[in-house]
Image: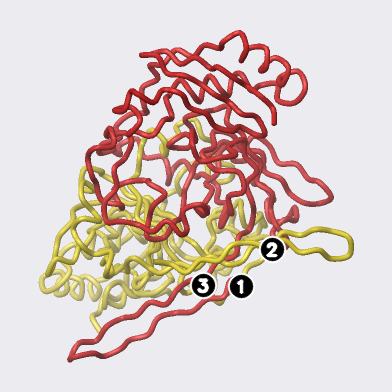
Chain colours: A red, B yellow
Amino acid sequence: MPFIVDFFYFYERGIWYTYFMDYSFSPIGKVHSCFSEKFGIPRQAGLVAEASACIELLPPYDNSDCVRELSAFTHIWVVFVFHEHINGGWRPTVRPPRLGGNKRIGVFAARSPFRPNPIGLSAVKLDRITFEKNQALLHISGVDMLDGTPVLDIKPYVPYADCLPSARGGFAKAGPDKPFQVDFSPNARSGLKKIEQNRHPRLGRLIRQLLRSDPRPAYYKTKPKKNEFGTRLFDVEVKWRVEGKNIIVTAVEQG
Amino acid sequence: MPFIVDFFYFYERGIWYTYFMDYSFSPIGKVHSCFSEKFGIPRQAGLVAEASACIELLPPYDNSDCVRELSAFTHIWVVFVFHEHINGGWRPTVRPPRLGGNKRIGVFAARSPFRPNPIGLSAVKLDRITFEKNQALLHISGVDMLDGTPVLDIKPYVPYADCLPSARGGFAKAGPDKPFQVDFSPNARSGLKKIEQNRHPRLGRLIRQLLRSDPRPAYYKTKPKKNEFGTRLFDVEVKWRVEGKNIIVTAVEQG
């Protein structure tokens, strides 16, 4: 049960002001995702279908009653905290990667994690619900959440209220292009094969889906001198090189 | 800038636990809506197109930079606090009105305001943005928010990520039926006419749209003895009577 304070009015120099106090929320769950670091995370939910995660509900929200009938929904909303941005501050304007990182738009016109209240919102696919020692685990895919993300709320995706086919989307009219061809070097291919056999059978698919949408921050695209990149997926280091419209994965290594 | 605490681990009786501390958020805005009380509020955003509201952004989030380019989006997400439910507690299961109020489903399978963290989420139409003394006001419609609702975040509705035509919706497959015929008594009609001329020119449309979807809580439907209801829209008292599939508005009075 969150500790909540409300608002009060105060009078200063002839004017009445409303002062809203803070609202305080306890996480109801925690995300275990393939994204072990921020670099490379897709910019919206749903872009990388292979990106899977599991939401571990925390006590006392983890019993089967809390999720009764939830599996009848194909998708859910995850309301979460951008926990690695909580001390990052915010600015009135941001530069979204979709606009090449050059144009500034208002923070409320963007989905950037650098927000006054660092609350994230993602519609993800609910693949299944399992129970371990009576603790509910929600298996989801199409995620854009960092491993360890605290979850504030889960809501069913209700198509008649949430899916608005007439909505028009400012700067982000369609999903990002997927113009990149992803190949593996012989070294990366052999590293991948070993890891796929032992631990992560669909890792190759995840890497392809993730890299073909070019998840580099926009500022790298205008600095062609740097063309080697790396990130961690699960406990695996992935390195790649950009050559024009080709991406060559150069290493896939556990550790 | 919100005050944020993180998580720590603790050890008890041979088991390591993760303790997540609370996250604290300050409202960035406040809703001024036609719904002066909870009774009668539509159960989802978008159901009553005539239901309009205005979000007043609070300092320091109220300058024009924060909403730059937002008007290019037709719809926005409003992340808000169910501020009249913050002390209401929560239960693992709820009885949604759509299921007649008899069947219990998990709190995370419902959009009920009685939640572990009373955070609301509504996709609404962004009609226009105006400025008063450099303070931004967002005019929205299709709202389901009580007057005075504190807003935690505004995000653009991004169709390619948020509109999922393939999603299937558990118990709430389609919007509610609209089987009720709404009529006004002579008394209500004359009260309405006066108020429409003076203050709220579209009030009649709002009342019709609102009542035809029968916003009574489910438990009234199985208690046919009570058939007189009332609520406040703006500063107007609206009273109605249910007779089978007809709703008769019996009074529309300012005060």
Q: Earlier in the sequence, mark 2 or mark 1?
A: 2
Chain bearing mark 2: B
Q: What amino acid type is highlighted by mark number 3?
A: His
Task: Find disc 2 in the rendering and name its residue.
Answer: B19
Category of crowding for the residue at label 1, using alpha-carbon neighbours closer than 10 angstroms: few (below 14), some (14–19), many (at least 20): some
Where in the figure is residue B96, as x and y percent of width and height? Answer: 58, 58
Q: Earlier in the sequence, mark 2 or mark 3?
A: 2
Q: Quadrant of the C terminus of chain A?
A: top right
Chain bearing mark 3: B
Task: Find disc 1 in the rendering and name its residue.
Answer: B89
Q: Quadrant of the N terminus of chain A?
A: bottom right
Q: What amino acid type is highlighted by mark number 2?
A: Tyr
Chain bearing mark 1: B
Where in the figure is residue A228, as x and y percent of width and height? Answer: 46, 24
Q: Secondary structure at mark 2?
A: strand
Give me the C-alpha separation between circle 2 and circle 3.
Answer: 25 Å
Q: Are marks 2 and 3 on the same chain?
A: yes
Taking depth in this image into account, of A140 and B195 the one nearest to the observer is A140
